């Protein structure tokens, strides 16, 4: 971590040490903060682990009052609590303190019972505040694991004690770019069936942390090799060995994984876009509908699921050509229950289902002789703020499609068309995507003496679409178009 981050953390943790001295408690920093410091990694979220000998629940309540922090019990049986210090002038970001009882009779025994050796290091908080580069207690040679970029389980029962650690291991591998040690993978594989007993919320959080990295493909490929993906995503596993014909170079499951790989590459630095689009796309994909779960992760999840309906819609015609007509509808239908299984919010679920359902549409737009303002308007009318996400997912899908008949010679032209689809949303929203109405429903009814009915909404939508096309630029023009619409739809007026 950089010097400024360390300064802010030390300032935030000095009151913690002052309280500890008054309470005659020795607090030890453990795990992530020491690991990240040792490898010079800047943390994205500030979650700091502490260990103390006993009585964590009671003592943490006192500390929470002292700090003005929220108190969140995590595990009453094992004495585990989270304190959340809100963002303040002195710490411009929230800081989470995870307070835990020793898991054994001593600090060293506690460290030996942790998940991975690179997390099994400790330093007294008092020492760290004085000299953060002082020596650490490191009974399992976690510093050596860091040096050789390895992820090693602390003991053979690591994953039987908590099967979620399987996902955590792949998440750490993706975040740090470290390799999982072979024996650790064997222990993981043996405990995969027990993942069924882990709460969906905990599984979701680890999966999203994986999708937030630029190595999600590596993680899900590794999880697939030991059976994790079959258990968590049987709908994806069902796509294994489903041949797609000459348009694709991979089977359906391989294509889904390759789409995730392409999303890793594209979303890491937005390299496929003009500089002005990169500037606006970065905050778009970083936006978090729910804390710690970004659009970037939702796009990758959509890429993983976008074709899961293909096995049910596979047909072969008389020429031997493979088709999957209507698979996007089945894919969306199958995606809904997966969102429930992962305990995602309503908004997140809607985003993923919508992208999956509409994932073919940008491809159709990319092949139109002309990308009309009407087509752009209708696309964003249907997808709203998920429109750019759908375009991004489609591009990952396109780049993952390299079969003999996939028209790879069109990619450069399609890339230009992709950017043309995105530009109106970011640079001309009031002109093309969400035109500001010249007249509202009440004004329309009063001016034209119309009763309230669904017809009013249809007229307003007709006017808005004409605005997006550039055919309406005033109230008078809007009213004139409304009258023309009424004349051609007089039957609807009489039944309204």
Image (cartoon, helix red, strand yellow):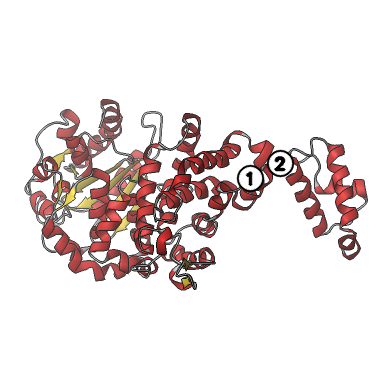
Residue 298 visible in this rendered orientation of the protein: no
Q: As drawn, is 139 to the left or to the right of 401? A: left
Towards the viewer: 367 or 347: 367
| Mark count | 2
Q: Check disc 1 and report its element: helix, strand or loop.
A: helix
Towards the viewer: 211 or 21: 211
Q: Quadrant of the N terminus?
A: top left
Q: As drawn, is 480 to the left or to the right of 293? A: right
Image location (x, y in percent) of residue 255: 37, 58
Towards the viewer: 197 or 333: 333
Residue 381 visible in this rendered orientation of the protein: yes
Residue drawn at 37 percent across, 48 percent down? 262
Check if mark 2's residue and mark 1's residue have beta carbons within 8 Å: yes
- As drawn, 47 above or below 40: below
In the displayed orientation, state which residue is furthest to the right: 449
Residue drawn at 24 percent across, 49 percent down? 172
How crowded pointer 1 is (Cα within 10 Å; few <14, some 14-19, many 20+) is rated as: many
Q: Which of marks 2 and 1 is nearer the N terminus?
A: 1
Q: Check disc 2 and report its element: helix, strand or loop.
A: helix
Image location (x, y in percent) of residue 251: 36, 63
**What whole-number distance in Å separates the C-alpha atoms at marks 2 and 1?**
9 Å
Image location (x, y in percent) of residue 347: 53, 54
Which residue is tagged 1? 376
Residue 426 bears which disc, if any? none
Residue drawn at 29 percent across, 38 percent down? 43
Which residue is tagged 2? 468
Residue drawn at 44 percent across, 52 percent down? 397
- As drawn, 29 above or below 299: above
Q: As drawn, is 53 to the left or to the right of 335? A: left
Image location (x, y in percent) of residue 455: 82, 57
């Amino acid at each position: 971590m950089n010097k400024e981050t360390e300064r802010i953390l030390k300032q935030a943790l000095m009151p913690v040490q002052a309280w500890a001295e008054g309470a005659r408690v020795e607090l030890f920093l453990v795990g992530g903060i020491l690991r990240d410091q040792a490898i010079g990694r800047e943390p994205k979220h500030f979650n700091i682990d502490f260990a103390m000998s006993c009585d964590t629940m009671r003592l943490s309540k006192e500390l929470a009052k002292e700090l003005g922090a929220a108190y969140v019990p995590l595990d009453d049986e094992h004495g585990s609590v989270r304190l959340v210090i809100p963002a303040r002038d002195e710490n411009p970001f929230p800081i989470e303190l995870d307070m835990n009882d020793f898991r054994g009779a001593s600090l060293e025994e506690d460290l030996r019972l942790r998940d991975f050796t690179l997390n099994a290091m400790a330093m007294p908080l008092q020492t760290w505040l004085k000299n953060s580069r002082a020596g650490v207690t490191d009974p399992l040679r976690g510093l050596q694991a860091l040096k050789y970029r390895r992820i090693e389980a602390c003991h053979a029962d690591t994953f039987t004690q908590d099967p979620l650690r399987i996902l955590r291991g792949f998440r750490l591998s993706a975040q740090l770019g470290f390799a999982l040690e072979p024996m650790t993978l064997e222990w993981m594989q043996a405990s995969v069936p027990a993942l069924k007993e882990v709460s969906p919320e905990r599984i979701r959080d680890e999966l999203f942390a994986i999708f937030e990295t630029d190595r999600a493909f590596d993680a899900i490929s590794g999880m697939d090799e030991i059976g994790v993906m079959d258990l968590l995503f049987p709908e994806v596993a069902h796509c294994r060995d489903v041949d797609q014909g000459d348009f694709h170079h991979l089977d359906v499951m391989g294509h889904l994984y390759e789409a995730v790989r392409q999303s890793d590459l594209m979303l890491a630095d937005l390299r496929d876009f003009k500089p002005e689009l990169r500037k606006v796309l970065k905050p778009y994909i970083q936006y978090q509908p729910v804390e710690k779960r970004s659009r970037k992760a939702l796009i990758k999840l959509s890429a993983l699921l976008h074709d899961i309906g293909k096995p049910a819609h596979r047909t072969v015609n008389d020429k031997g050509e493979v088709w999957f007509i209507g698979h996007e509808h089945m894919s969306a239908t199958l995606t809904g229950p997966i969102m429930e299984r992962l305990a995602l919010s309503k908004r997140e679920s809607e985003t993923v289902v919508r992208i999956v359902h509409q994932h073919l549409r940008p491809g159709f737009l990319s092949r139109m002789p002309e990308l009309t303002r009407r087509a752009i308007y209708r696309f964003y009318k249907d997808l709203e703020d998920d429109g750019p996400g759908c375009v991004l997912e489609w591009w990952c899908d396109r780049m993952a499609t390299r079969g003999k008949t996939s028209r790879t010679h069109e990619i450069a032209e399609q890339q230009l068309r992709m950017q043309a689809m995105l530009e109106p949303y970011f640079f001309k929203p009031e002109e093309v995507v969400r035109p500001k109405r010249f007249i509202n429903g009440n004004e329309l009814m009063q001016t034209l003496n119309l009763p309230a009915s669904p017809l009013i909404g249809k007229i307003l939508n007709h006017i808005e679409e004409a605005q997006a096309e550039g055919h309406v630029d005033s109230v008078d023009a809007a009213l004139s178009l409304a009258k023309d619409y009424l004349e051609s739809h007089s039957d609807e007026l009489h039944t309204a």
